[in-house]
Amino acid sequence: MESRYNQLTGTDVLTYHWLIPPGTGVSVGELEVVSDERSGIRYFTRVTGIAHDPETGGVQVTGLPIGCIDQERVFRKPRTIPLLHSPVRPLQSTEIAVLRGFMGEIEVGTVTSGNQRMVDLPVGIPSSVLNQHLGIFATTGMGKSNLMKVFCASAIVSRKVGILLTDPHGEYATGQPGNPDSRGLVHHPLAKDGLRVYTIRSKDVAGEYWMKTLRIGYKDLAIADLGLIFDLSPAQYEVVNLLLPFSTDEIIDFFINDDVESLPSHLRTTAYIGNHQEIAQRVRSAPPDALRLVQRQMRTLLDLTSKFVHPAESSLPEILEDLDNNRVVIIDIPGMSDAAELFILSAISRAIFKKRQRRFIEHGTAGSGGSVLISIEEAQRVLSQHSEKTGIFREIAMEGRKFGVGIGAITQQPKNIDSRVLAQMNTLFVMGLADRQDREIIASSAKHDLRVLDTEIQTLDRGDAVISTVGIPFPVSCRIHYFEDYLDSLWENSSG
Ligand SMILES: Nc1ncnc2c1ncn2[C@@H]1O[C@H](COP(=O)(O)OP(=O)(O)OP(=O)(O)O)[C@@H](O)[C@H]1O
Ligand SMILES: [Mg+2]
């Protein structure tokens, strides 16, 4: 019986079984190789199940085939099965090298095989897939922000993609507020070249880290974004639609300076004596209550964003230029409200999309530079099933790919993201997710079948992720680098 241990005892194309001696350590997620000595094909497999086998007293292991390499070391989907009794063993260094060949330049962590970190097998996402959107899913505190920081740190090293991050918690640029051990992207050895921070902080703080003052001009804003932030009634939508032909600086000027109460309406015949004849003329027919509400909401938004919204000045041209130069751009707005964050994120995202769309129409390509990834925290706010709340973000999710604009959707509630949007995401980071429905939604929309990995996904610790991306031919279990440690290693490499 002994001789049967560590040999394939049964198989079909989708599952392998083998026995190991009792007391041998094995854990879910471990990578093994089934070596078919007759054909020379080596089959990679990932442990998905472990159970006692009363008949033999051993431990029955179930594995999921993830791919195989032939003698030429070409990696394929396993369409054949290994010979019965083929030996099952750990990966050898040449096999690890084959897997390393799939990894891209945006390093996020190391592959884990069960409980072990494979330090010689870093996980890197190819930057070429970032226009195909990315999702990061985890319950609160499981490591989403840490992952995003590591991702950006690697992007600063490789300079193949521009990344836009809005940061209402003030954690990405200088580290978690109130935590003296936490550091941020300004502490990156290449920050001066690869990072730009636009901030609302005081000149003193900004000056210390070469941050720039954030300005968004009236023209950059869009009246249609009211719908993103407030629940508008049909009558309010009517007002918004009436205003669409006008430029936002005119609309704002009109709402700030004119009292809509005094507007001539179809009931009143008094003449309008303001600077905005055309606007006044156009909104005359609008329901007065709705018009008043829209004016109030516009004024509220301007109040909320008064720290950076400006009648004329704008950082947008510079921000777009930074992204074209494959820099990480942080919009550092600590303490800003949800509404203010969305308003500005939408304005910048629209500008990025339109610029690249125009370039595509004029030149037939999205340009030779890299893609831009727009990171959206709490993405269910703007990518939900309720399409009136999605604005420019849905447009980017559906069409951004051909213009080189991708979305990085970060959320704790993937079930609240529109399934059509989820289906567009070609790179998924699944971290600890307590809710079964959330896991099922993701598993069924991933490019790899993740349902078989449900046990593993359920047991993920903080900082662990299962990564499924079109760039790598099988789902990868990964220990995400701890940002502060990763920074240390970048400093060591830069000085050594
Ligand atoms: N890969 C990791 N290695 C070690 N520690 C980690 C890792 N990822 C996260 N942590 C720790 O967990 C804490 C929470 O992580 P993080 O802030 O990234 O979570 P989050 O998912 O963004 O949470 P929230 O939902 O509150 O935004 C961090 O302060 C950090 O100390
Ligand atoms: Mg976070």
Image: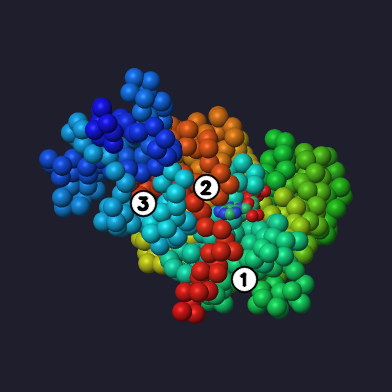
* CA distance for labels 3 and 2: 19 Å
Look at mark 2 in the image and give the residue it sits on.
Answer: 464
For badge 2, the amino acid type reads: Asp
Q: Residue at x 62, y 71 (%)?
A: 186
Mark 1 neighbour class, 10 Å CA radius: few under 14, some 14 to 19, many 20 or more? many
Q: Is mark 2 within 8 Å of ligand 1?
A: yes
Task: Please say whether residue 172 is visible from this viewpoint.
Answer: yes
Q: What colouring method underlies this structural image?
A: rainbow
Q: Residue at x 47, y 37 (%)?
A: 456
For badge 3, the amino acid type reads: Gly
x and y, in percent, of residue 295 in the image: 79, 49
The residue closer to the viewer here, 231 or 97, is: 97
For badge 1, the amino acid type reads: Val
Q: Nearer the viewer, mark 3 or mark 2?
A: 2
The residue closer to the viewer here, 467 or 81, is: 81
Q: Residue at x 44, y 49 (%)?
A: 116
Look at mark 3 in the image and give the residue it sits on.
Answer: 471
* CA distance for labels 1 and 2: 25 Å
Q: Is residue 475 left or right of residue 138?
A: left
x and y, in percent, of residue 443 in the image: 46, 34
Mark 3 neighbour class, 10 Å CA radius: few under 14, some 14 to 19, many 20 or more? some
* CA distance for labels 3 and 1: 29 Å
Quadrant occupied by the N terminus: top left
Q: Is residue 190 left or right of residue 232?
A: left
Q: Is mark 1 within 8 Å of ligand 1?
A: no
Q: Earlier in the sequence, mark 3 or mark 1?
A: 1
Q: Is residue 109 left or right of residue 65?
A: right
Look at mark 1 in the image and give the residue it sits on.
Answer: 186
Mark 2 neighbour class, 10 Å CA radius: few under 14, some 14 to 19, many 20 or more? many
Query: Residue 236 has which mark?
Result: none
Q: Earlier in the sequence, mark 1 or mark 2?
A: 1
The residue closer to the viewer here, 353 or 169, is: 169
